[in-house]
């Protein structure tokens, strides 16, 4: 006997592209209650019954976490689809077997990732993998388990990883690998609770309450936007206020550059213009990015100095440059600062001087500029803005968290290089928010005259 199901009634809407995708990686980040895990579980069961030679590997960080998460989710999917009589569940070892063909869904933890590279199946092919709560896993671990799905597939079959997670931390390798650099091999999606038509009114009310009481958490937990696991340091950052379309810089504005050095990690050189009111506009970015989060290019200081010289035109009339003072350390001959400055000097461009020290003071100066001053309408107008072409500035500022050891500054182990350059720039142009001048108080005007004079 055959039973026909209308899948949209069972699965719901919002995941059509994801369901039908056959790329090697289909990656979905999203809010809570966005149907990520339930959709993947339903899809795996349907596919297993459709492809009689396919097997699936399901992975989480630890093996003990699988039974009450993915294993339970897949059993729910079996019942939801009304096919429980065709499946057998075992708990030692944890697995699900499709009885008509002997296909298996295997569950493993990353407690020992090396054991997963040699995993095999008795019947058919290991075609598909599901990595749940992927933010718990390092990229190196994923590289190892990615290799467990390999080999030639029969006609019509394909290898694919389904990767699901909540986007709590924007510094995660998942963002850099799957979302920042689109690839033909990847489908990357963001889903929200609004695509879950099975939520009750009470469920939706909880998200609405979060929207009003905790807007920052709402963006991540409800809208699936990237967040910061340890608390965002520059909460004042708002791309709607701080990013502007490029425009022609007036020739009489002061211009300067600020730079943070890096070799194994990225370097960052930023060019700034100062308007008539002392506001800063960052109009150019040179970022030594190796293609992955917090990875540098390995270029020498001389090579980077040459790049700066090629980007910068003499008619720009750059007034000065500030560079991390640590670059003058005599770890080699010449030092980093000398190698960069030699290239600038040869091009007849202003060389770099030492930046002022004080990470806490500099981050506070940057925060003050992000807030800015009140205008006549009582609205705050930022005293620093960035051209939209400064891609790595816009990427890295919102992901910086508080330093674990010093909450007064940002995490120095994170990708902080653009912010370091901004801090050097802010320290070179001290900013003091304008304050209202108190009205003059004349003592004789404050005396209250009697309403009547008697004598």
Image (spheres, rainbow, N blue to C red):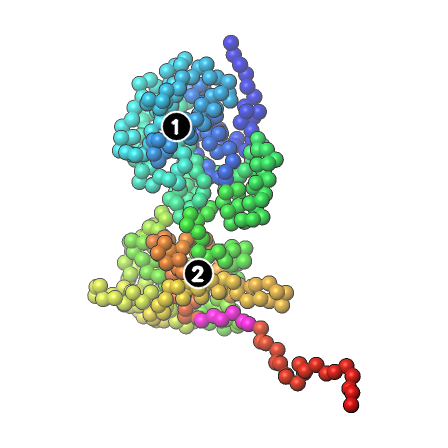
Mark 2 lies on a secondary structure that is strand
- Residue 280 vertical position relative to residue 133 in the rendered view, above or below: below
> How far apart in space, not on screen, are marks 1 and 2 (Cα)?
51 Å
Side of 412 where 41 appears, left or right: right
Residue at 45 percent of width and 53 percent of height: 232
Relative to the observer, which residue lies in front, 452 or 73? 452
Specify which label sits upstream in the sequence, 1 or 2.
1
Residue at 57 percent of width and 40 percent of height: 206
Whole-percent x, y for residue 67 in the image = 39, 28
Residue at 32 percent of width and 63 percent of height: 305
Q: Which mark is residue 284?
A: 2
- Residue 404 vertical position relative to residue 221 in the rendered view, above or below: below
In the displayed image of the protein, which residue is found farthest to the top?
1
Whole-percent x, y for residue 293 in the image = 37, 48
Q: Is residue 251 magenta?
A: no
Side of 396 where 371 appears, left or right: right
* Span highlighted in magenta in the image: 430-435
For the stretch drawn in magenta, the main secondary structure is: loop
In the displayed image of the protein, which residue is found farthest to the front?
455
Relative to the observer, which residue lies in front, 446 or 439? 446
Quadrant where the C terminus sits is: bottom right
- Residue 251 vertical position relative to residue 245 in the rendered view, above or below: below
For mark 1, does the 10 Å Cα neighbourhood hold few (<14), some (14 to 19), or many (20 or more) residues?
some
Q: Quadrant of residue 411?
A: bottom left
Residue where numbered disc 1 is placed: 67
Q: Quadrant of residue 326?
A: bottom left
Mark 1 lies on a secondary structure that is helix
């Amino acid at each position: 006997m055959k039973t026909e199901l209308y899948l949209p009634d069972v699965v719901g809407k919002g995941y059509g592209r994801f369901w039908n995708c056959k790329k090697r990686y289909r990656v979905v980040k999203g809010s809570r209650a966005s149907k990520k895990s339930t959709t993947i579980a339903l899809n795996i069961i349907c596919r297993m019954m459709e492809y009689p030679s396919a097997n699936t590997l399901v992975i989480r960080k630890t093996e003990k976490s699988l039974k009450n998460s993915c294993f339970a989710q897949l059993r729910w999917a079996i019942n939801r689809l009304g096919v429980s009589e065709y499946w057998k569940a075992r708990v030692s070892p944890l697995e699900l077997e499709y009885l008509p063909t002997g296909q298996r869904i295997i569950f493993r933890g990353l407690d020992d990732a090396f054991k997963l590279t040699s995993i095999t199946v008795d019947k058919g092919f290991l075609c598909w993998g599901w990595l749940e709560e992927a933010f718990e896993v390092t990229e190196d671990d994923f590289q190892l388990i990615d290799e467990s799905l390999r080999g030639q597939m029969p006609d019509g079959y394909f290898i694919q990883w389904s990767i699901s997670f909540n986007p709590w931390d924007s510094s995660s390798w998942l963002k850099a690998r799957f979302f920042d650099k689109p690839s033909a091999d990847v489908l990357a999606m963001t889903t929200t609770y609004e695509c879950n038509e099975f939520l009750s009114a009470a469920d939706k009310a909880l998200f609405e309450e979060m929207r009003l009481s905790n807007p920052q958490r709402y963006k991540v937990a409800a809208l699936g936007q990237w967040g910061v696991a340890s608390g965002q340091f520059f909460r004042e950052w708002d791309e709607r206020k701080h990013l502007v379309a490029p425009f022609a810089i007036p020739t009489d504005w002061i211009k300067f550059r600020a730079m943070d050095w890096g070799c194994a990690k990225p370097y960052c050189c930023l060019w700034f213009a100062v308007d008539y009111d002392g506001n800063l506009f960052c109009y150019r970015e040179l970022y030594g990015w190796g293609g992955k989060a917090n990875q540098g290019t390995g270029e020498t200081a001389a090579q980077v100095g040459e790049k700066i010289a090629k980007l910068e035109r003499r008619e720009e009339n750059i007034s000065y440059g500030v560079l991390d003072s640590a670059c003058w350390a005599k770890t080699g001959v010449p030092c980093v600062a000398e190698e960069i400055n030699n290239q600038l000097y040869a091009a007849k461009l202003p060389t770099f001087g030492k930046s002022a020290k004080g990470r806490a003071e500099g981050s506070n100066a940057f925060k003050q500029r992000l807030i800015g001053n009140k205008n006549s309408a009582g609205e705050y107008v930022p005293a620093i803005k960035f051209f939209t072409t400064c891609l790595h500035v816009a990427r890295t500022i919102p992901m910086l968290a508080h330093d674990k050891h010093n909450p007064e500054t940002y995490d120095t182990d994170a990708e902080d290089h653009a912010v370091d350059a901004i801090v050097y720039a802010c320290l070179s142009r001290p900013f003091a928010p304008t304050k209202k001048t108190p009205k003059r108080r004349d003592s004789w005007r404050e005396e209250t005259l009697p309403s009547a004079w008697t004598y």
